[in-house]
Image (cartoon, rainbow, N blue to C red):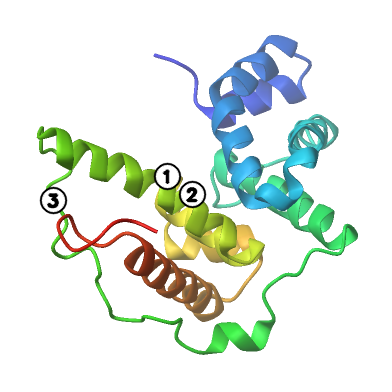
Amino acid sequence: MDPHDDQLMSAFAHGDASAFEALYDRHRAALYRFVRRVLGSAGAAQVDEVAQDTWLRVVQARQRWAPQGASFRTWLFTLAHHRAIDCLRRSGRELAPPAAEDSDGPGEGVAPWQDWPDPAAREPADQAFWRAAGQRLLVCLDALPAEQRAAFLLHHEDGLSLAELATALGLGFETAKSRLRYAMGKLRACMGAYLPAPGTGAAG
C-alpha cells in the first residue's frame, strides 16, 4: 500500500528527500492544472512561477507542518490559491468585490442544460456537443473573477467539501457557500447563453 500523504510529509520533515519526490509526483499535475485555471488567460505567463513557488513553500514549511484537520492536498492547494491571488493582485487584475458575493449570481436556479444529451451517448452529434460543452466551460471559467473560479475548481474538480473549501480559502462557511453559489450562477448563465441544446441553434 502506498504511504499516506501525511506519512510522506512527516518523512520529508525528517530528512527523507524521496518522500518529497513521491508527494511531488502524486500532486504535481493536479496542482499545475489548478494554478493554470485559477490564473486564467490573464495570468498564463505566471503559471510556472506560481506552481514552483508553491512547492518551494512546501519545502520551507516541512519542519513546522502538521495535520490540523485538513488533508495535505487541501493545504497544498491553499498555498497555491493564496500565491495565485497575490500574483493577480500585484499585476492589477480585478478580483470579485466582496459585496457582489452577497447576492445570488445571474441565472440562479436556471438549468440551461436540462435538455442536453446524455454524456454517455455515442452518437457523433452528441459527442461533438459535449466536446463543445467542455471547451465552452473553460471559456466561461476564464471569465469568472479569480476568487470565484478558485472556489468552483476546489469544490467541483478537486472534491473539497464546503467546510474544506472555507478552510482552504480562509473564509467563513456561509461566505464560501455564497462565493460558490455566485460562481455557479454565472457559469449557468454563460453556458446557457452560448451552448444551446442540440437542434436549438449553433453555439456562439
Tell me the residue that label 2 is attached to. 138
> Label 3 crowding class (10 Å Cα cut-off): few <14, some 14-19, many 20+?
some
Residues at badges 1 and 2 in contact (C-beta under 8 Å)?
Answer: yes
* Secondary structure state at the residue bearing disc 1: helix
Q: Judge whether residue 186 can be spotted in this image.
A: yes
Cα–Cα span, label 3 and label 1:
16 Å
Q: Quadrant of residue 36?
A: top right
Query: Label 2 amino acid?
Result: Leu
Separation of disc 1 and disc 2 at Cα?
A: 5 Å
**Which numbered disc covers residue 117?**
3
Q: Residue at x 86, y 64 (%)?
A: 92
Q: Residue at x 17, y 55 (%)?
A: 198
* Kind of residue at disc 1: Gln
The residue labelled by disc 1 is: 135
> Which residue sits furthest top?
18
Front-lying residue, 50 or 108: 108
